[in-house]
Image (cartoon, rainbow, N blue to C red):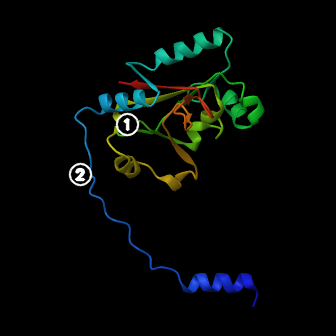
Amino acid sequence: MSARNQILGSISKNKPELTELPVIDIQQVISYKDLIEQFTNTLTGIGGMVVQISDEQEIIATIAAERAAGNWVADTIWDSTEAINSLRSQSAESLALIEKTYIKGTVGVAENGAIWIQEHQMVNRLLPFICQHLAIILSKEQLVATLHHAYAQIDIAEEGFGAFIAGPSKTADIEQSLVIGAHGARSLVVYLVA
């Protein structure tokens, strides 16, 4: 018997017993009187921005103005099928030139400011992470208090990939210098639609 097989055999003999996951009563976890206020305060506190709007047409007008200014804007929501299909097949090198990306979110979490985005909403897995600025559109009705509530609403295995995004990206060093936009989008704005 090889050393590898001896090690693997020893490991398999000494596996700990599986422990059942605890059942969490989501009625007993933290709750907030005003989810919108909590979500806004949390996301603002980590460097993001929340803009409350009454109609998605305001965002469409913003996208048109940004494109008229000459910026490459990736719109994964309202763009033509042809434009969206083009984004799917682009390389990291070409996507790195995108100034701003607009993506629809699935659920927003008030306790930590994170938004769940499914793979089909991203169009290309690189988009929310490689663009200079990220805009996520989320309905106010899609806000929940905690991650427990969020996980109750999403099926992680549905598409095989998704991510909670609470941005913008940031890093800090031992000298306590905070750098925002260090390894991903430099800014995040969440449009909360009434």
Compared with residue 6, is residue 103 higher up or lower down, i.e. above or below? above
Q: Residue furthest front?
A: 175
Compared with residue 71, is residue 85 higher up or lower down, i.e. above or below? below
| Quarter residue 182 falls in | top right
Foreground: 184 or 78?
Answer: 184
Q: Earlier in the sequence, mark 1 or mark 2?
A: 2
Q: Residue at image x 64%, y 13%?
A: 67
| Quarter residue 122 falls in | top right
Amino acid on which disc 1 is placed: Gln
Question: From this viewpoint, is residue 124 visible?
Answer: yes
- In x, y percent, where is residue 167? 51, 33
In the image: residue 179, left or right of residue 27: right
Q: Which residue is labeled 2 in the image?
A: 27
Q: Which residue is labeled 1 in the image?
A: 142
Question: From this viewpoint, is residue 90 visible?
Answer: no
Q: Nearer the viewer, mark 1 or mark 2?
A: 2
Marks 1 and 2: CB-CB under 8 Å? no
State which quarter of the image contains the N terminus. Answer: bottom right
- Using the image, tell me which numbered label, if any, was put on residue 157: none
> Could you tell me which secondary element the residue under label 1 belongs to?
helix
Mark 1 and mark 2: Cα distance apart in space:
18 Å
Neighbor class of circle 2 (other Cα within 10 Å; few <14, some 14-19, many 20+) is few
- In x, y percent, where is residue 7? 66, 82
Q: Residue furthest bottom?
A: 1
Q: Residue at image x 61%, y 33%?
A: 184
- In x, y percent, where is residue 42? 37, 32
Amino acid on which disc 2 is placed: Gln
Neighbor class of circle 1 (other Cα within 10 Å; few <14, some 14-19, many 20+) is some
Compared with residue 146, is residue 173 higher up or lower down, i.e. above or below? above
> Could you tell me which secondary element the residue under label 2 belongs to?
loop
State which quarter of the image contains the C terminus. Answer: top left
Foreground: 67 or 147?
Answer: 147
